[in-house]
Image: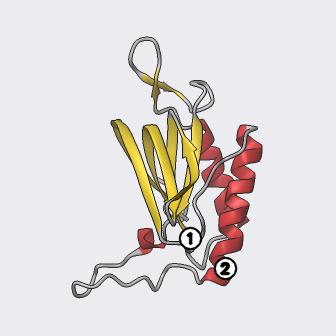
Amino acid sequence: MRVLLQRVTEASVEVEGRTKGAIGKGILVLLGIEAADTEADIAWLVGKISRLRIFDDEQGVMNLDVQQVGGRVLVVSQFTLHASTKKGNRPSYIKAAPEAVARPLYNRFIEVLSQTLGQEVPSGEFGADMAVKLCNDGPVTIWIDSQNRE
């Protein structure tokens, strides 16, 4: 699983002109799933996201996690995070999991993240054409790959 996290002052996702999910201060999670991903990847990423200290404390140091600042998390599926641009100019998405694999893992990711945070986690709609709006705070943008745990 790959995620692109963006610390935001606000973010929302729309499907066919209607708001599907929205948050104020918090983290926008763009989530890409590949065929090799498992429940272990979900557990590791959810733990990392929920404890990631990317919010400022009183001294202006990124030392607080999303829960400590009363923030929320919005999750949007994004298979293009697995784009390969190694050959040619048209990205290949061969590593992205097919829907039959990705959809259940996407739903489970949201479920586990909701349980961990103790709050509903709004999300986009898997497989839909979505419009994502956000105000990146900082900007703070972080890439995490559960297959490459740096």
Toward the front, the furthest residue is 17
Mark carried by residue 42: none
| Residue matched to label 2 | 101
Q: Is residue 149 visible?
A: no
Residue 136: give x, y in percent of width and height: 36, 41
Q: Quarter holding the N terminus?
A: bottom right
Left or right: where 31 falls relative to 56: right
Is 110 above or below relative to 91?
above
Tell me residue 40's x, y (percent). 70, 62
Residues 137 and 32: in front is 137
Q: Which type of secondary structure does the marked residue at label 1 adopt?
A: loop
Which comes before the other along the chain, label 2 or label 1?
1
Quarter of image, res 120: top right
**Left or right side of 74 for 55:** left
* Closer to us: 13 or 50: 13
Q: Nearer the viewer, residue 18 or 121?
A: 18
Does any portion of residue 123 appear in the rendered image?
yes
**Which amino acid, mark 1?**
Ile
> Residue at the spot x=62%, y=81% of the render?
99
Q: For mark 1, what is the residue?
A: 33
Q: Which element type, helix, strand or loop, lies under badge 2? A: helix
Tag 2 near tag 1, CB within 8 Å = yes
